[in-house]
Amino acid sequence: MRGVTKAIILIIVGLAMLIPFASTFPDGLEKVVESLGLEEPESIWRGLMPDYTFPFLENPYATKLISGLIGLFLTFSIAWSVGWAIARKHSFKK
Amino acid sequence: MHIPDGFLDPYLSVLMHIIALVSLTWAWKGVKKTLPHSFVPLMAVSSAFVFVGQMLNFPIVYGTSGHLVGGTFLAMLLGPHAAVISMTIVILIQAVFFADGGISTFGANIFNMAVIGGLSFYLVKLLSNVSSSQKRFSVSIFVASWLSVVLGALATAIQIGVSSMFASVGGVKVTVPAMLFWHVIIGVGEAVITASLTSQFLRIKPAMLNGLAMLRGIAYERRY
């Protein structure tokens, strides 16, 4: 468990440090759509934190950090639960 | 390369969901057969890592950016089956909570990133030829992770190219070269990150690389 805590702390530190350097340019697919002169159709679902922004939080760093942390813990707990549900209950016979 | 809602024709959306479902069944069965509960923490941590990695775009050229997909990295840590499951969870959370990638295009996004990413395990296997040479292993990972991004982009390009939204601009003949142009470059970023992370693991904590152990045919109970 200590390894898990250490790894998560490392990931959080990495996130907090790298957010200011993250590029806001369009990614490959967005660029292709843009250069072909097409418009992204109206989305059927806007998500709770669209484009990694936390509602009502204006500061660009804070909003990305908070939404990122929420995403991180969501991913961690869902992956844990799903993994626990699929993996074998008992370890292999020694 | 997360495809948003509205890019794909409905029949294609349905088809991609079926393909994704078949792949997930294969992955589910594989995890059940090969991995015990003690493996779960590693799966949770590496999924969280990939979520964060995909948030942080790196700039390439001409005002375009790319980000780590992480398929090959997951495959080296978790093996191909758990890598597919793990990446699917990341894509699900991105779509539901962050509107990054659509809901109707969920199947396509699973195929392009989770399935191709997880299956890049077999690319590493093929390229390294189960050689025990560390250098050959690193080179294989570099090439396989680059290919996983390029092949994912090719699949994306074909899916959007045959859909009606892109018909007016020339369809596949336009989308394939355009997508490949950017992702051949973005793939280099993926390859550099994946190869350097895995060689660090190989140096400091080789026991974490379950995928590598599977590659060499070592069963879980005999790994430590």
Image: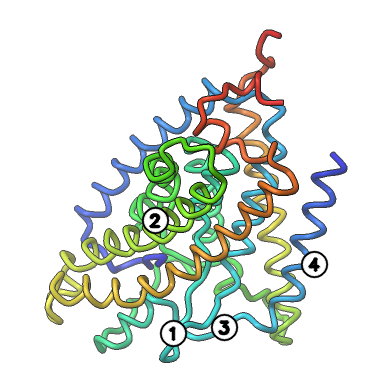
Q: Position of residue A51 (x, y in %)?
A: 55, 74
Q: Amino acid at mark 1?
A: Thr
Circle 3 chain: A
Circle 1 chain: B
Mark sitting on residue A13: 4
Q: Residue at x 56, y 24 (%)?
A: B218
The residue under label 3 is A23
Question: How many angstroms separate mark 4 from mark 3 (CA)?
Answer: 18 Å
Q: Residues within 10 Å of mark 1 (few under 14, many from 20)?
A: many
Q: Residue at x 34, y 59 (%)?
A: B152
Q: Position of residue A40 (x, y in %)?
A: 34, 79
Q: Label 3's element?
A: loop
Question: How many angstroms separate mark 2 from mark 3 (CA)?
Answer: 22 Å
Q: Label 4's element?
A: helix
State left or right for residue B90 relative to residue B64: right
Q: Position of residue B148 (x, y in %)?
A: 39, 56
